[in-house]
Amino acid sequence: MQSFWQSLPKPFFVLAPMEEVTDTVFRRIISSCGRPDVMVTEFTSVEGLASEIGRSKVIHRLQYTPEEQPLVAQIWGITPEHYYQAGVYAREQGFAGLDINMGCPVKKVIKQGACSALIKNPQLASDIIQAAKEGAGDIPVSVKTRIGFSEIQTEEWIGHLLQSHLDALTIHGRTVKELSDYPAHWDEIGKAVNLRDKINPHTLIIGNGDILSYQQGLDIATQYGVDGIMIGRGVFHNPWIFNPNIDHNTLSIEIKVQKLIEHIQLFDQTWGQEKNFAVMKKCFKMYLNNFPGASDIRSKLMQCNTAEECIKILRIIIDKI
Ligand SMILES: Cc1cc2nc3c(=O)[nH]c(=O)nc-3n(C[C@H](O)[C@H](O)[C@H](O)COP(=O)(O)O)c2cc1C
């Protein structure tokens, strides 16, 4: 059966998974500004999913609504059996795909041997992919990774992953050691495309790193031959980034403030007390920027503790416009 990845336009655009950011609320709000072709959940521990108590703690990460499809569940962990179970679960829950995180550089996960630590353990990486595929059945399995651990190892590591017949492979063009502190090596992503052409032409390559506009995404996709572009932090600069018809620099203050109100309301309706309102505060700057007085409004909002307080302030601002 052809996977949904194969039916996407080229190049397609993907909203990157971002922990404590790209939850169901964020994904729906971004889609309402400009729809990415694919979205991915925050990374979710397969070890957590494997027990009843653990599952209750992590399940909010996989909450979604049908309008977010095609939605890919991203998972991480070290136990192949748990990947198998997560694959079964993702299929039963109706996700369009399953993505394995082999790129997170956070020390806590590396210590466990998970995520980017798998770059140093290619045999376990292969076992994990195999187990996830068996569990996922007919839903496609992809991997998101970096180009090496301490040094660039594109040929060795990406070449290894390509032998697992993945449906898609997202390459964040930095080593683990580089975190996000250096410019992404797009030339290495280009090398990975050439490797793919030789080793496994079926696997789609998604390039990731430092894309700040839709047009830049189109240009870089042409330059390096990737099938798709993944954008993460670019949405913080411009929530309308996936909409080629909107130049966010020309949007009125009213539209930006209205969108923030919508975001806060959806956050409140969806999560209520379940999530700390501080999580929402990370998003204020996305809308309140590039206009006189924006930083003063942000300071006032940062002092609020509830959605209601914030919305009251924002409505007064709209009334004054
Ligand atoms: C706040 C934050 C959380 C992130 N969480 C995840 C995650 O859960 N899974 C993942 O694969 N990558 C995660 N990433 C990495 C991004 O998906 C992406 O690879 C990285 O930000 C580089 O792309 P960009 O330059 O477009 O932001 C996260 C990044 C940020 C900034």
Image (cartoon, rainbow, N blue to C red):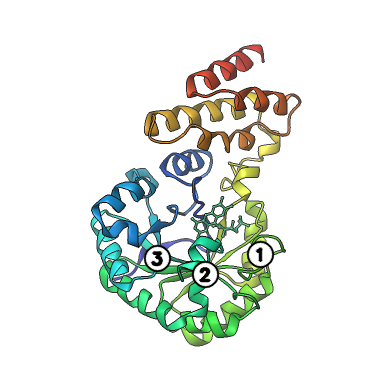
Query: At label 1, which amino acid type do we have?
Result: Ile
For residue 191, what is the image quadrant? Answer: bottom right
Q: CA distance from mark 1 to mark 2?
A: 25 Å
Q: CA distance from mark 3 to mark 2?
A: 11 Å
Location of residue 154 with respect to 115 vertically, above or below: below
Q: Is residue 293 left or right of residue 306?
A: right
Q: Position of residue 156 (x, y in %)?
A: 56, 85
Asked if the beta carbon under badge 3 is closer than 8 A to the nearest atom of ligand 1, the reply is no
Q: Is residue 92 left or right of residue 113?
A: left
Query: At label 2, which amino acid type do we have?
Result: Ser
Label 3, secondary structure: give it.
loop
Compare marks 1 and 2 and give the one earlier in the sequence. 2
Label 1, secondary structure: give it.
helix
Label 2, secondary structure: give it.
helix
State the residue at coordinates (34%, 61%): 46
Q: Is residue 249 left or right of residue 55?
A: right
Q: On the rendered image, what quadrant is the C terminus found in?
A: top right
Q: Position of residue 178 (x, y in %)?
A: 67, 67
Question: Does any portion of residue 228 appear in the rendered image?
Answer: yes
Q: Residues within 10 Å of mark 3 (few under 14, many from 20)?
A: many
**Res. 77 mark:** 3
Q: Position of residue 234 (x, y in %)?
A: 63, 49
Residue under label 1: 220
Query: At label 3, which amino acid type do we have?
Result: Gly
Residue under label 2: 116
State the residue at coordinates (42%, 83%): 123
